[in-house]
Image: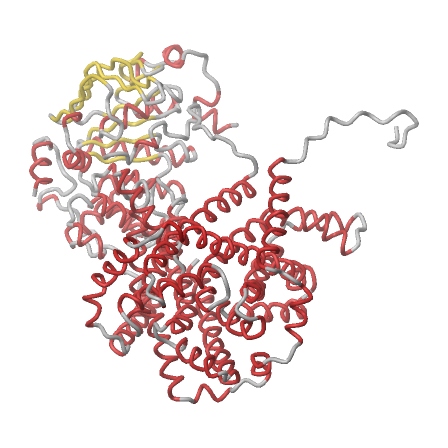
Amino acid sequence: MIRFSNASVTYPNGVSAMKDLDLEIADGEFVVIVGLSGAGKSTLIRAVNGLVPLTSGELNVNGHDVHALNRAGLRDLRSDIGMIFQGFNLVDRTTVLKNVLMGRLHEVPTWRTLIGKYPQADIDIAARALARVEIIEKTYTRASDLSGGQRQRVGIARALAQDPSIILADEPVASLDPPTSHVVMRYLQQICRELGITTIVNLHFLDLATTYADRIIGLRDGVLVFDGPGSECDDTVFESIYGRSLTADDTMTKHGAL
Amino acid sequence: MAGSKLRSKLRSKLRVGLMPTPPNQPAGVELPNKPVATFRWVSTALALTLVLWSVLKIDAKWSRLIDAPGDMWTLCTVMFSSMEANKIGGLLGKMWESIAIAWLGTLIAALFAVPLSFLAAENLVGRPIAWVTRQIFNVLRAIPEIILALAFIPIFGLKPMAGVLAIGVGSVGTLGKLFYEIIEGINKGPVEAADAVGASRLQRLRWGVLPQVTPEITSFLLYRFEVNIRASAVLGLVGAGGIGSALAQALSFKDFGTAGLGLIIVVLGTIAVDTISGAARRRIVAGSPRIVKPDLNDPTQSETRVDVFRGN
Amino acid sequence: MTTLDDAPPPVLPAKPGVSTFAVGGALIAAALTIVTARSVGFSLSEIITNFTRKNSPAEGLLHPDWGQIWSRRSRTAFIETLQLAVIGTAIGATSALPLALWSTTFGNPNRWLRMLVRSCNNVIRSIPDLLWALLFVTAVGIGALSGLLALFFFSLAVTTKLTSDTLDGIDMGPIEAANASGASLTQMLRTAVVPQILPSYTSFVLYNFELNLRASAVLGLVGAGGIGQRIEFFRGAGRWEELWGLVFMFFLVVFIVERISVTLRRRLI
């Protein structure tokens, strides 16, 4: 379970990206966060695994006060939280398998990672993760030889290989075309439902949000302005979240038609 | 292991992991066959054999290796404890001489290398001429300046001129190679444009080629200057003038204090030249300095990227 | 309307001034040249007279003794030079990788330690190879060991700089991913950073080997082993033909090694 209590984040340059946030996310929920760029979506997601520290307030993840964790504790926390990035963040020069095995780093002793000999059990976990996103035939392909959609699937596999209880996805489909975006979102939804992993996704295409989310959270200038089921979200709601009228860029179908 | 303890506490008891219990196990997940990287294995094996052979066969007194750090330490303490302030002036003058030798040598090399490099660029003069010029460059590159210095000293005497010419001749090869590679890498557009308006060969050079290559050439010249500072310090060790000769002399007369002082001056002087030259080079290649601020309105840029690895 | 009107031509916008940097730079360069030429006693006429005068090095140059390759002593020196270069590169260039990683922001979060490593790197880089050799010969004694130690530091200097420069330009994405998954610093470096620079790094090691081969040839001039000692011997005895023969033979070998190295390097990048 994730609970923000009166949480705020102010960056060194003075920008206030989170203002007095109160939010509770139960285990197994599929949550989508929407808002303009700079509204604080990225900040919220990165606060969950401690990449962005809170300036004030409290954050409790799975029973732990994130602020009170030391470096080792943060690493332990992060090993239980998988993260998926807009830019995929794969090591282009190495194989898909090596990339997915990065998800096992926390569990594998350092000397083994130094020489590159991972235990068979961990390789099996990686294999299962690859099978789940249906990309196992590309195991020994270089990551740079894959398409965008395939790379994101590897990113998901890497997160899955951690065997996490939470998955954070920061704009996972922003660099992908519409059909591929749906494929990726469907994987995330399936994983959440079948494996019970709490999933938080940042999206800026509103139609994707309403299609896949159980719960939508709207942020504006670091403040929570909407929290409810996708069914309650129509264009008026989104306009109030964005603080402006919607354009073609805000929906994937209309954007794709451009 | 500490990690597992915390993780079992964190994990909810009702959550189903990736690995369901045996009865539900899906059909064996098999990875495809792993390709064998022959080239990598063979070359690593060869390299290791070479290293092993060298280590075993070299005629070095390994026993002295244990004492080496101690000996070095003793030398350093002796050098730096008996430095005399009155020697600074003379040594600085010698360092200046080394800088002068490096500067002039680089310039002379440039003087010959720039026109020659045009003769080595395939996109300007055609294959045969280019090939000949390139081989000349290769030969000149292969001979270290110090050997040239050894040859020039009997001709010019134990004077800085020997060093200047040694560096000059030696650098023509490297500079020439770098220059022709730059010239060949240029955008054909301006050259074609010059041809289209009917420019002569020389004009084409001046207006089509030169504007594109001048910043990079200047930058490389400065880089070569930095390298040649070290070369000229070294040439002094065999007597071609500069701080090297002062150092060699001091050490042979067991005047360790002066040697220590000289060493410090060499280090500081080289770092100083490197810094100034490096800054000049960056400025030349980049244009005027601009301060780039992160764009917070750019949706593709994470606001927090900078803090990702700080302290965690 | 044609461009060749009778009407007065339009006024062009104000011409931007010539860059002060360029002008200043050119002036400094010119001044430096004049001053240095004076210090060094540059005289074109002197150069020409000296070059055209009869002298032994030039004569030896015209009749190099190609038989040097068959001389047993020279061959032993050849091999020693090769061995010095190999070991120096192996130990020095491999140590350069951790040192370079240690000087980056992501590899060394501790600011003071990082500054210390960077300063050490700068100092090591500013001492030329032969000077290292001279210092070690003074401290440890004549012989191949001093040459080895000198090449170790020289290799550190060269490879660390090149690797640091490459590390400045890597993709931070995988680093963020590794940190987000709870990997330790060493694991992160090994899986997210090293694979990115491995081809470049290997190329630098090969380049370093080429440099070391050349350097190890001259280390003997100050007594640190290799064919440098033979060269010094011939020079002292004024036997220029043999000296040039040795030099050419050796550098033919170096040339061949370089050709191989360049082809290998091209395959990496």
In the displayed structure, B299 sits above or below C268; it is above
Residue at the far right: name it. C6
Write down the quadrant of residue B49 in the picture. Answer: bottom left
Q: Which quarter of the rendering shows the N terminus of chain C?
A: top right
- Side (left or right) of A70 relative to B225: left
Residue placed most toward the observer, B165 or A85 = B165
Residue B258 pos. (x, y %): 36, 57
Residue placed most toward the observer, C26 or A93 = C26
Residue placed most toward the observer, B297 or A15 = A15
Residue plotted at (49% across, 44% down): B276
Residue plotted at (36% across, 34% down): A86
Write down the quadrant of residue B159 in the picture. Answer: bottom right
Residue A61 pos. (x, y %): 16, 26
| Image colouring | secondary structure
In the displayed structure, B18 sits above or below B228; it is above
Residue plotted at (27% across, 14% down): A227
In the displayed structure, B133 sits above or below B25; it is below
In the displayed structure, A48 sits above or below B99; it is above
- Side (left or right) of A41 relative to B5: right
Residue C250 pos. (x, y %): 46, 78
Residue B37 visible somewhere in the drawing:
no
Residue plotted at (35% across, 40% down): C172
Residue placed most toward the observer, C222 or A17 = C222
Residue C181 visible somewhere in the drawing:
yes
- Side (left or right) of C207 relative to B12: right
Residue A174 pos. (x, y %): 40, 31
